[in-house]
Image: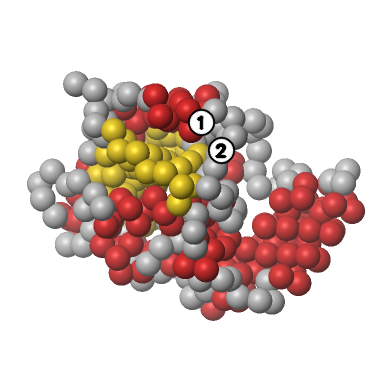
Amino acid sequence: MTSHPVVVAVVVTYNRRELLQTTLEGIASGTRVPDAVVIVDNASTDGTAEFLQQYQGTVTTDVVTLNTNVGGAGGFVVGMERAVLDHRADHVWIMDDDTEPQPDALREALDVSESYRQAAGKAPAFIASRVVWTDGRDHPMNRMRPRMGASENERSAAARLGATQIRTASFVSVLIRAEEIQQHGLPIADYFIWNDDLEYTARISRRGTALTTNASVANHHTKVFGDAGADPGPRFYYEVRNKLWVYTRSNALAPWEKVLFTGASLRNWTRTIAASPNRKVLLAGFFKGLRHSLKAPRSNDQVLQGIYALRNVQEPVR
């Protein structure tokens, strides 16, 4: 890795043109901007494709327009692979299209990553930003808990840098070392939405170090301030199926972690269903997710076969 590591941002978007514009403005206004931005458009129908065709930013953009919506999971597979293979990234900075990185988000994440490497002799697998809602409160949907089982030395080493050891993070401003992607592979596209980030960040941090730092901040522009327990409607299917896939089909979690996570999920699901005015919808999603979790996810090649429609690389405006 060079003294000026190559950083490629990956943004996945679907039918949120105005929010995407905010995301790109946040990236471009940083005190450290990425060397390129890969934007994966999941077959949007709201004018996003036209906006991206005309977009002229101050950072090189690599726009990939898909002919099928393969969800956030599939979009990140496409974008992360392109960042590593085509752009030769040292770090891949990933986020959804409702993320607004604050000016120092990338620079602080890079600084913490390098400082930890110098102090501990090994670089962290990823650095996750502190995620806040539009009013500055910590977003409960993106809450990151300290890693259970971390040694006192490990916790102290992170604390000296203003960081905390964590186990998992959401795909809202996460800086991942390309070497980790090459070693552990890509997210699982068949998750479509939800919990692909749980599985992937847990996979690459199981035997490595992952950190979050309050110095790197991103706003998450969700419609409401709430966590995953908010009534998800028909999408509850993906919550159930995908979490069960994590617990039964992935080696991302240790056996004791699977027991704890499963218990927590069962409690959360029970509360969500009990509090919902649409219990029939959630119960239908629960049983459908339970049934479909019995079959393993398809390979990324199967899910992503034939999805490419257009690629457009634009040089930055000087």
Residue 48's tag is: 1
Rendered-image quadrant of the C terminus: top left
**In terms of secondary structure, where does tag 2 sit?**
loop
User: For the view shown, which residue lies furthest in the top direction?
Assistant: 318
- Residues marked 1 and 2 touching at CB (< 8 Å): yes
Q: Residue at x 66, y 38 (%)?
A: 226
Amino acid carrying mark 2 in the image: Ser
Q: Residue at x 66, y 76 (%)?
A: 295
Q: Is residue 190 above or below residue 64?
A: below
Count residues near mark 2 (Cα–Cα under 10 Å), then give few for <14, some for 14-19, many for 20+: some
Q: Which residue is mark 2?
A: 44
Rendered-image quadrant of the N terminus: bottom left
Q: Residue at x 66, y 32 (%)?
A: 224
Q: Position of residue 308 (x, y in %)?
A: 45, 52
* 17 sits to left or right of 270: left
Q: Position of residue 42 (x, y in %)?
A: 52, 44
* 312 sits to left or right of 288: left
Q: Residue at x 20, y 46 (%)?
A: 6
**In terms of secondary structure, where does tag 1 sit?**
helix
**Camera sees residue 193:** yes
